[in-house]
Amino acid sequence: MENILVINGHEYWSFAPGRLNKTLFDEIISQLEGSYNIKTTVVQEGYDVKEEQEKFKWADTIIFQTPINWFSLPGAFKSYIDAVYEPGVFFGGDAEYGHNGMINGKYMFSTTWNAPEYAFNAKDKFFKGQDIEGALDHFHNMNKYVGLEPLKSFGAHDVMKNPDIDKYLTELRAHLKEVFNV
């Protein structure tokens, strides 16, 4: 892994100004630059589809920094994926369904959740025993379909009711050290 594309998919609203996602996005870049070549995209600032496709081809690893809104990506980030993951560029051919991805490399999700940590990994809680990877399974399938392989995901939890920025940054640094050896 030498080339890393870091994407900030936060959609900015008055009730969710995205300071935490920007802080995590900036921290990822700060921790990885110097050891890796970094390119970035901030979805809400606009983008050129062809340029983004070239960034994906360039990158060995893509890091998606995003809040999870209603168990999905923010609308602008989903529109970005719909435009950039173009047939014939990201997938195609006659292979069996799910085996025709054209993008090589790895990806990592760095996510922010309103859901508290206790809602995961317990069968009697909201996610019915799923861990964060299980809750992100549909996103994993999206990237598997285009040929990318997952790295361990990061999650900051309970970010609106009980934010703890220092805890999130400490955990993110430890996560990046584990995944990227920085």
Image (cartoon, rainbow, N blue to C red):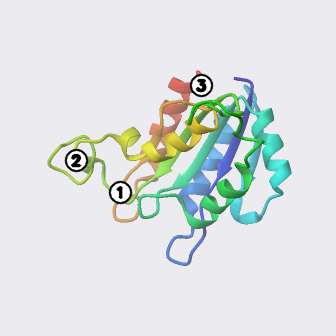
Q: Residue 114 falls in which quadrant of the image?
A: bottom left
Instruction: Look at 75% across and 64% down and name the residue there.
Output: 45
Residue 128's tag is 2
Q: Which residue is mark 1?
A: 158
Secondary structure beneath label 2: loop
Give amino acid for label 3: Phe
Q: Are marks 1 and 3 in contact (CB under 8 Å)?
A: no
Instruction: Look at 40% across and 39% down and name the residue there.
Output: 133
Judging depth in this view, the residue of 80 and 164 nearest the camera is 80
Q: Which residue is mark 3?
A: 180
Judging depth in this view, the residue of 69 and 12 nearest the camera is 69
The 10 Å Cα crowd at callout 2, few under 14, some 14 to 19, many 20 or more, is few
Upstream in sequence: badge 1 or badge 3: 1
Looking at the rendering, in which quadrant would you find the N terminus? top right
The x, y position of residue 90, in whole percent, is 72, 41
Rounded to the nearest whole Å, what is the CA distance between mark 1 and mark 3?
Answer: 26 Å
